[in-house]
Amino acid sequence: MENLDEIFTRLKEILKDYQPPFSSKADDESHFDLWSVKDLVIEGRKRKEVYFAGLIIQKAYVGFYYMPVYAEPEIKEFFKLELLSRLKGKSCFHIHKLDSILIDQI
């Protein structure tokens, strides 16, 4: 699957399976996100919500943002090379093509 709209739609279907317990603030044809909405404390700071994951269609890829990787980098040990090779920065994966291995990892 190489069409960015198709990739976005398929990944959005996967992420929507997590509603609830997560909720979305952005849900349109090019943006989608999931937030944990509950009172919690992170590093001594009170929060009412925490960004969990999101998608955005960029010019040449679909950006898949997965914040647990940012908070706990050791999670990357569970990912296969096919997904890890698409990690750019701390928590953004650039998805150009989507196959069954990536779908299983995501």
Image: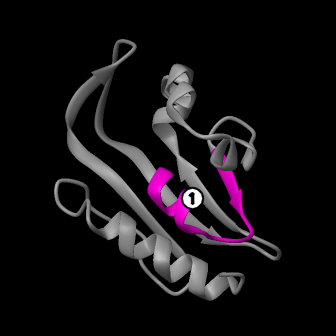
Left or right: 20, with 48 as reference point:
left
Residue 96 among magenta residues: yes
Quarter holding the N terminus is bottom right
Does 27 appear above or below 91? below
- Amino acid under disc 1: Leu
Residue under pointer 1: 102
Front residue of 87 and 19: 87
- Image quadrant of residue 21? bottom left
Q: Around disc 1, counting alpha carbons within 10 Å, would you say few (fewer than 14), some (14 to 19), or many (20 or more)?
A: some
Q: Which colour scheme is used?
A: one colour
Q: Identify the residue shown where x is 46% and y is 35%.
A: 68
Q: Give the range drawn in magenta.
A: 92-105
Q: How far from the left and from the top, in percent, is residue 32?
A: 47, 70
Q: Is residue 106 at all visible to an observer of this figure?
A: no
Residue 95 visible in the displayed image: yes
Residue located 53% across and 74% down the image: 31
Residue 72 image offset from top left, x and y in percent: 49, 23
Q: In this view, does 29 lie above or below 72?
A: below
Residue at screen point 82% across, 74% down: 60
Residue drawn at the location 55% of the way across and 58% of the way down? 101
Residue 75 in magenta stretch: no
The relative height of residue 34 versus residue 17 in the rendered view (above or below) is: above
Side of 81 where 78 appears, left or right: left
Residue 95 in picture, x, y percent from top left: 69, 63
Looking at the image, the residue that sits furthest to the front is: 100
Q: Left or right? Give the position of 67 relative to 38.
A: right
Closest to the observer, 41 or 6: 6
Q: Position of residue 49 (x, y in %)?
A: 30, 43
Give SS at disc 1.
helix
Pick the front one: 103 or 26: 103
The number of numbered badges drawn on the structure is 1
Image: 43 above or below 22? above
